[in-house]
Image (cartoon, helix red, strand yellow):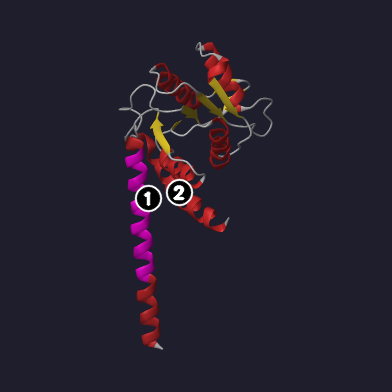
Amino acid sequence: MKRLIVVAGRAALAVLACAALAWGWVLVAIVRAGARDDAAGLAPGSTDAIVVLGAAQYDGRPSPVLRMRLDHAIALWRRRLAPTLVLTGGRGAGDTTSEAAVERRYAAHAGIADSALLMEAEGRSTRESLAGVAALARQHGLRRLVVVSDPTHVYRVAVLARQEGFEAITSPWRPVALRRDWRGVLAESVKVPVAWVSRLAD
């Protein structure tokens, strides 16, 4: 019996050690992805679309986070990185308009013609929005997509995009800063494994 307990204890420690190593790997991957802008060195016209992932809006006004994402995406568009902006995000509980509609108005005020915009206004989560983006990409023949989001979010974005059948060139609106972003990094370190497991369960 003692030997069985010792073996079980060693097995449990081995499992915990593997889990800790895997978690550490995910933490590093999140920080590394958030520290670099994969769109920074791209030439004008080298991609097909710039995707803005939605965030909260307040009575038709973008939240500060959404505004930062939009400003960064518009700057990339003005660099002529791609001819099209894809605006994403559905309605939250109690909202009278979608995040994508708010983004569309913001882009229009920035001088971007409606003909340069595509909308995915149904997604209520990152996965749902990226699934909608994948459908739009197939419909419009878009192959190389730059996806703009927060620095702690872009690694999970890349994981989910691959699961939806396309490769995301991620571009955070600013580099990750651990002193400011550690809570987001920890939250994403849980959400990324959940994204892997949920896909396996599909």
Three-letter amino acid code of the residue under disc 1 = Val
In terms of secondary structure, where does tag 1 sit? helix
In the image: residue 47, left or right of residue 95: left
Q: Nearer the viewer, residue 114 or 62?
A: 114
Instruction: State whether the magenta stretch is mostly helix, strand or loop.
Output: helix
Span highlighted in magenta in the image: 13-33
Residue 90 place in picture, x, y as percent: 62, 32
Residue of label 2: 192
In the image: residue 46, left or right of residue 56: left
Identify whether 146 is placed above or below 108.
Answer: below
Q: Which mark is residue 171?
A: none
Q: CA distance from mark 1 to mark 2?
A: 8 Å
**Given contact means CB atoms under 8 Å apart, are the residues at marks 1 and 2 in contact?**
yes
Three-letter amino acid code of the residue under disc 2 = Val
Q: Residue at x 33, y 24 (%)?
A: 43
Q: Residue at x 40, y 85 (%)?
A: 4
Residue of label 1: 26
